[in-house]
Image (cartoon, grey):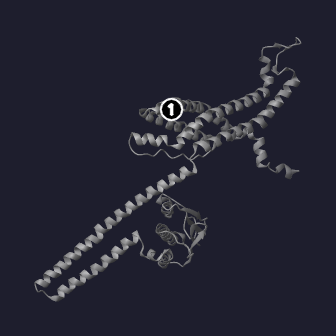
Amino acid sequence: MSTLAARPLPRARRTFVLGLVDPRTWRDFAFHMAALPLAIAGFTWSVLTLSAGIPFAVLWVGLPVTAFLVVGNTWFGAAFRRVARGLLGVDVQTPPAPRGRPGVVGWTTARLRHAPSWRALAFGLVAFVTSVIAFVVTITVLVTAVGLTTNWVWSHWLTPMTDEDGVLHSGIQVGTVFVDTPLMQAVATVVGLLLLVFVWPPVNRGLAAGQGALVRSLLGSTTGERRVAELTRSRDDSVRGADDTLRRVERDLHDGTQARLVALAMTLGDAQDRLQDGEDPASVGRLVEHARRSTQETITELREIARGIHPAALDEGLEAAIASAVSRTTLPVQVRHDRTLRPSAVVESAAYFTVVELLTNVVKHARATRAQVVVSRDGADMLVTVEDDGVGGAHVSLDPQTGGTGLAGVADRLRTVDGTLTIDSPAGGPTRIAMRFPGVPA
């Protein structure tokens, strides 16, 4: 018997029985209270958009006004998202903002073509109906339940009423029945408790779940919008990365290679002057030798600069480039490469640099004794995995002070080719990092 008494209730049953004291139930109820005024305001703006925006849209000068009214629906949508996130725990990703060309025409066109604004307008119309229904139903059930439960306290203060048979009653009336006897009051109290404990919490929760689903469907960003936003960000990152690379090359050429070439020209000019003046050939030879060494150093420097732009090893393919990178690693690395893969030059470059970065991380952070690089096909995608037997704990960190391992840069580079990064690195190891490159032809 003691074992049965100590056994906890199943989670679903416990949630059902204790729904009245569950904080989530009251957060859902608070959402219904907050949603109603927001829904009224959003509905008013939506009606204003339809009633005033359409007439203004007939005139060219009125299009900016219409655009302003349309995009204004997103303000109420943002408020609904915040309330739903705070009270219902519904995490809805904010849709991307309108993007257009500068100027009034660009601003107007971008907002009139902004799909999330039109979805927010539709939400304002629908949410008004659903919010009113949810508010009325949950309040009605709750007030009825509390009223029946406490009827024996307050019903005596009601004005007495005469029944059809002429009998005077002083209790509440339910249909044609008066609750004014101790038995009837007890029955009403039991019914009220049943409504309060077993009916109102699930009704309240179900209404909140429906509201949350409506918020997710109309106020969140769609898969296509998230995809476009991600590609736009990747494109911007690529442009900034290319600009940074060009600036670095320009700086390296100006501060390093150009200075060496100027010094080389001066050395050769000095040697030429000495030859013309008939000086000792040995001194001229020393100058020429110095110029030769300087030329070799300049060539090496130019190769280092060019390697940062496009590794020479990639001219022979991704497999050869990875093999070259592995040969410079200080720990044993096994490489397996599917030779049927034919990625584009852009994908090859991205795969090479990410593998180099990951192997560098293994050497610097993982305290591993061996690693493995596998390049394989997964359907229409190329899958590149880097594994090691190190201490684990690899993670993406944008702040170098928090112990990040450079994986943020790898993720950024993958986004430029529409790739994805998956990290499996529990504490204690091992670490497996998979990079997926889509759309690689056979």
Q: In the image shown, does 356 or 309 lie closer to the viewer?
A: 309
Few, some or many residues within 10 Å of mark 1 (<14, 14–19, 20+): some
The amino acid at mark 1 is: Ile
Q: Which residue is mark 1?
A: 54
Q: Residue at x 22, y 83 (%)?
A: 288
Q: Is residue 179 visible?
A: no
Q: Residue at x 79, y 27 (%)?
A: 148
Q: In the image shown, does 408 or 9 lie closer to the viewer?
A: 408
Residue 313 in the image, given as x and y percentages of width and height: 44, 76
Determine whether 32 is above or below 430 in the image. above
Q: Is residue 428 left or right of residue 413?
A: right
Image quadrant of residue 194? top right
Q: Is residue 242 visible?
A: yes
Residue 207 in the image, given as x and y percentages of width and height: 69, 38
Residue 279 in the image, given as x and y percentages of width and height: 12, 86
Q: Secondary structure at mark 1?
A: helix
Q: Which residue ends up furthest to the left in the rendered image? A: 277
Q: Is residue 287 left or right of residue 204?
A: left
